[in-house]
Image (cartoon, rainbow, N blue to C red):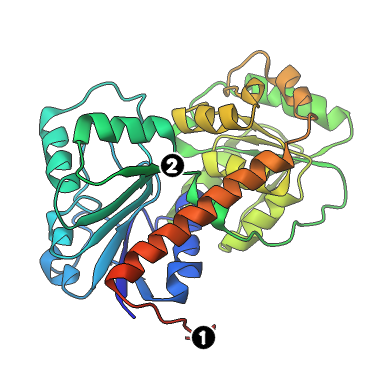
């Protein structure tokens, strides 16, 4: 059994990243001891030298999420101290909408990805994989698979008393004009739906997004927030429709068969909805067609398409486990370990 360090945006409370952490704990954590490497939530992220931190682990997994950023580099994700140990880069994304590639950043990423201790690389969509292959030129093959959150077993869906529409907002889009979302919420309320504002975050993210939810000027909304990730997921599963500013809100919704109107049509959202043949549900906070697009949400999600994403993510995690197992024998831990 190996001690595996987990490198990622863990602990800040962002819903998607906490799903990734949960996924690692429930998969790799069944066979190896896993622990998050950083011990503070601000740079330099460690109370000790990163080289000393790396020595406490036999290997490190970096991922998932949009960790490969073309114009800046994180001393948490791409710290050369990790290269003292075998490194497995898994399920990462590249925000390819960032067109500026800083030469010093690309060089440092190249040096990291090309290091002989990098044993495995995978990306969560073909666009990210192609970017990594083209600009970082790693020596190992770059695999592609669905977002790793699809490997999770989700908790049972919550049973709302009435038909319910969910919305979620986030701090860095709080300045957008709320008129279209207000119009959509009003129309849906008038058709008999309850409107809940889901605060999709815990800890620090929950506190910030809760302020945004409270500032949204729709008097009939009910705000739901929790420190329990499973409770947040369960609420998503009980909705009739989700209007989401958060990518993993949409990911979780699809896993429950709940339609989600995407209010932040980033590259990863476009890639996902291309695979699900639901690009007509890509929108924005100020989209004048928001209500008509929300009505299209009645078109059911293909369960076969979602099952394929889940199978892909599961196969990717099993492949990674076999790759780690080639370096470190696996031991199944008891549930109480």
Number of other residues with Cα within 10 Å of mark 2, as a class: few under 14, some 14 to 19, many 20 or more: many
Residue at 58%, 18% in the rendered image: 286
State left or right for residue 72 relative to residue 27: left
Mark 2 residue element: loop
Figure check: 291 above or below 8: above
Figure check: 4 above or below 139: below
State left or right for residue 139 relative to residue 150: left
Number of other residues with Cα within 10 Å of mark 1, as a class: few under 14, some 14 to 19, many 20 or more: few
Q: Nearer the viewer, residue 101 or 91?
A: 91
**Residue that carries the numbered disc 2 in the rendered image:** 124
Task: Quarter of the image for the N terminus: give it.
Answer: bottom left
Q: Position of residue 315 (x, y in %)?
A: 51, 55
Label 2 with label 1: CB-CB less than 8 Å: no
State left or right for residue 288 relative to residue 21: right
- Residue 82 location, quadrant: bottom left
Q: Nearer the viewer, residue 153 or 330?
A: 330
Figure check: 281 above or below 231: above
Q: Position of residue 21 (x, y in %)?
A: 44, 61
What is the number of the mark on residue 334? 1
């Amino acid at each position: 059994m190996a001690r595996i360090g987990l490198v990622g945006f863990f602990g800040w409370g962002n819903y998607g990243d906490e799903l990734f952490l949960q996924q690692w704990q429930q998969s790799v954590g069944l066979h190896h001891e896993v622990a998050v490497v950083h011990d503070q939530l601000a740079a330099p992220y460690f109370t000790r030298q990163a080289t000393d931190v790396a020595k406490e682990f036999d290997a490190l997994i970096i991922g998932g999420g949009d960790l490969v950023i073309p114009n800046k580099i994180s001393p948490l994700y791409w710290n050369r101290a990790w290269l003292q140990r075998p490194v497995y880069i898994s399920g990462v994304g590249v925000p390819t909408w960032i067109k500026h590639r800083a030469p010093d950043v690309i060089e440092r990423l190249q040096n990291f990805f090309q290091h002989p201790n990098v044993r495995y690389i995978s990306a969560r969509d073909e666009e990210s994989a192609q970017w990594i292959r083209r600009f970082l030129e790693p020596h190992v093959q770059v695999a592609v698979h669905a977002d790793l959150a699809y490997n999770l077993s989700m908790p049972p869906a919550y049973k709302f008393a009435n038909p319910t529409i969910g919305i979620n907002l986030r701090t860095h889009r709080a300045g957008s004009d709320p008129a279209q979302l207000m119009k959509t919420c009003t129309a849906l309320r008038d058709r008999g739906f309850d409107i809940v504002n889901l605060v999709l975050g815990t800890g620090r993210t929950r506190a910030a997004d809760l302020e945004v939810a409270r500032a949204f000027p729709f008097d009939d909304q009910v705000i739901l927030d929790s420190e329990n990730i499973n409770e947040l997921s369960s609420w998503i599963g009980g909705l009739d429709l989700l209007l989401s500013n958060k990518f993993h809100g949409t990911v979780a919704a699809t896993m429950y068969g709940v339609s989600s109107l995407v209010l932040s049509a980033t590259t990863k959202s476009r890639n996902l909805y291309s695979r699900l043949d639901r690009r007509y549900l890509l929108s924005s906070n100020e989209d004048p067609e928001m209500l008509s697009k929300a009505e299209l949400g009645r078109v059911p999600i293909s369960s076969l398409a979602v099952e394929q994403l889940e199978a892909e993510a599961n196969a990717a995690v099993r492949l990674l486990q076999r790759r780690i197992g080639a370096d470190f024998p696996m031991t199944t831990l008891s549930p109480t370990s």
